[in-house]
Image (tube, coloured by chain):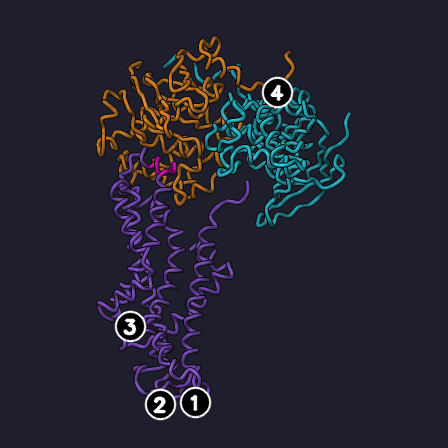
Amino acid sequence: MSGIFCSLRQLSVTYGRGVAAALDGIDLDIVAGERLAIIGESGSGKSTLARALAGLLPEGARVGGEMLWPGLGHAPRPGRDFGVVFQDPGSSLNPVLTIGEQVAEGARRHLGLSWKQAYVRAEELLGRVRIPQPEKTMRAFPHQLSGGQRQRVAIAAAIAARPALLIADEATSALDVVVQAEIVRLLDGLVREDGMTLLFITHDIALASGFVDRIAVFRNARLVEAGPVRSVLSAPKSDYTAALIASHRDLATPPLITEVQP
Amino acid sequence: MNWLRRLLRTPEGAAGLAILLILLLAGLLAPVVSPGDPLRIAGRALLAPFTDPAFPLGTDRLGRDVLAGLLYGARTSLAVGLAAAFSAMVLGLCVGMVAGFAGGLIDEALMRVVDAFQIVPAFLLALAFVSTIGVSTPIIVLAIALGTWADPARLTRAQVLAIREQDYVASARVIGMHPAEIAFREILPNALPPVLALSATIVAGAVLTEAALSFLGLGNPNIATWGSMIAEGRSVLRSASYLSIIPGAALAVTVLGVHLFSEGLGQALGDNDVGAA
Amino acid sequence: MNDVLLSVENLSKGFSSGARQVAALDNVSLTISAGETLGLVGASGSGKSTLSRILLRLLSADAGSIRFEGVDWLALNGASLRRRRARMQIVFQDPLAVFNPLASVGAVLDDPLRIHGVVAKDRRPGEIAMLLERVGLPADYAGRPVRALSGGQRQRVAIARAIAARPSLLVLDEAVSALDVTVRGRILELLVDLQKEQGIACLFISHDLAVVRAVSHRIAVMDGGRIVETGPAAALVAAPQSDAARALVAAVPRLATDPC
């Protein structure tokens, strides 16, 4: 298969005044070109992992272990080597800049394009992320778009400079199920077309399992289990993973109420 | 109290609190250290500081004890500063709360009044007030308060408007809480912290304004104030500069102390948020 | 036992955003009988939250009527509204934002008991302990600040507060959406148990059809401010008629294990 893109060896992170580690001795390889889901509930450390990879840890955070980037050969450059899509579509876009400016910025800065060329690319990207009427949207402001559309814009901005890695940190958690499914399809398609590596961080194991290659389950700052999605789901090695799978509820799950009304 | 402990943990808070406590002690112990009227002629004129143990900080042109003036002046500065700031805060809080809750025309009308008071520079307002009405201490307190109540009013209103939209206020309404109870139990305690942090700055400003009024001869002539001491020292600034420098330094340290305290308080109260999830 | 508890008729509410008029609710009608759970599903912007806010009298309606326990609900105001509020309560989505940051668990539960005089003053601590136990929390949590609890625990306190005044209708507005998956199931079970025990009717609002299916007797589907489909839960999920319902059914994530 393809080579290793990023390798985490005993990665540990403790926040400034914290006593407990937010990440504890993580050993994980990210394969180039794969779609890897990081599954965890609150306090699992999944967001800390995203921030550590993106170099967004706050001041005073203590990092142990190493993050190696054999796929790049050098420390990753934000925007150029990786892009990030955050959870909250309301605050990840700058409210006073137009959509066009925000999407074009990455292309201009990292690909050395002129503003004009960058704008052309930005409009193409808006089309790729299925924004209706891309030319009009280029001049619009974030507050004029819905949450789902803003998230599409955020994705476009993240991939503007053709990064090798896309980190989606709970990118669908603030959206409703219908939009969630659309965004997941979009991410899947984009990543396949461009050959990007995708790190999809979420608490929803079912949502991730629908399209990723591997999953890694985190709990209380530790990596509990990692492997190809089908094997982990059909034969989970850890009780916690089994509990996560058991808690999943879909339309086939028997309801909690009795059908006959009281 | 929890916030006090947090305050003391910040270097600014600890330093500020220390300075203010020294000031408070100075004011309280004034009659003990320097008994008698500080404005009486106590000894030879223009005695330099550190020369005569009876007058550790020297005497002024009329022979008044500088140390006595300093200690009693601390009382005036603190008393006027605190009283003026307190009045400004209470007035500002009340107006801000009413405007924030009432909305509509009442809000508009009150905000125009706040605008009017904010447009006039606080010092000039105090100056005009004192020179027309008179120079008693209560008038000075009122004059300073009138110049500074507008900021807390605006801040309180902004806080009330923001907090009103919070889910916990909606929850209180759904429970069936009476609007007055919601205002005082849910909204006011949560609106206070930033306004309280502002209060320290107002105290500093009030202290300076009082000193400036005294300096210009518009203070109460019957009590010792640092401002009047600085003014008195002007005429002998070259030969006896200590007369202006000592009270000036005291003023600077006081204002510094208040600002440091306010910094520390802001950090202590604002430190409520949980860290990264 | 199958009397109509809540009857919403032709409720409409519009917002003007700039030059545009948006109909957040467009002639919405529904009924809930005593002791039943009506699930209300729809995508974001379908009007679910607007409906719940109007029901809870946090927002005013432009047109329409609501009859609750036989009274004209929208006509009530002031003290008479406050009194009757005890009968309809809500659990919101964000378990942190719904509590006064300075409050303790005990204070939060004491409020509705005190305001509606549910029990005599000296019996309130006992009632608080009982409420905590009912929602699966230790009685000694009463002294803790709410901020010290986890999301799931806070939501339990929110449920305890909501049932303290013995309501006949409980509105749950995305009440489990912000909770961890492993916690969600337990909260849903708690709600179903409470209903069986106390006969409280529920309006369960969510964008997640799977969650709604788990706890509802009937389901109403909202789209663009209108109710586009209503029916018994099992039937609606098995054979959705409207486009909106079909989209919601299709969007429910399924675990991708190999079919056996």
Residue B110 image point, x, y percent: 27, 48
**Which numbered tag is attached to residue B43?**
2
Q: Is residue C196 left or right of residue A3?
A: left
Q: Is residue C169 visible?
A: yes
Of B75 and B220, nearer the camera is B220
| Of pointers 1 and 3, the one earlier in the residue sequence | 1
Question: Residue beneath label 1, please?
Answer: B52
Mark 2: amino acid: Gly
Drawing shade for chain C: orange
User: Regarding mark 1 in the picture, which secondary structure is present there?
Assistant: loop
The answer to which of B93 and A101 lies nearer the viewer is A101
State whether residue A245 appears in this view. no
Label placed on residue A210 = 4
Is C63 drawn above or below residue B103 in the view shown?
above
The location of residue A5, given as percent across then percent down, is 73, 33
What is the secondary structure assignment of the residue under circle 3? Answer: loop
In the picture of the structure, the residue carrying the numbered disc 3 is B218
Q: Which residues are magenta?
A: B165-172
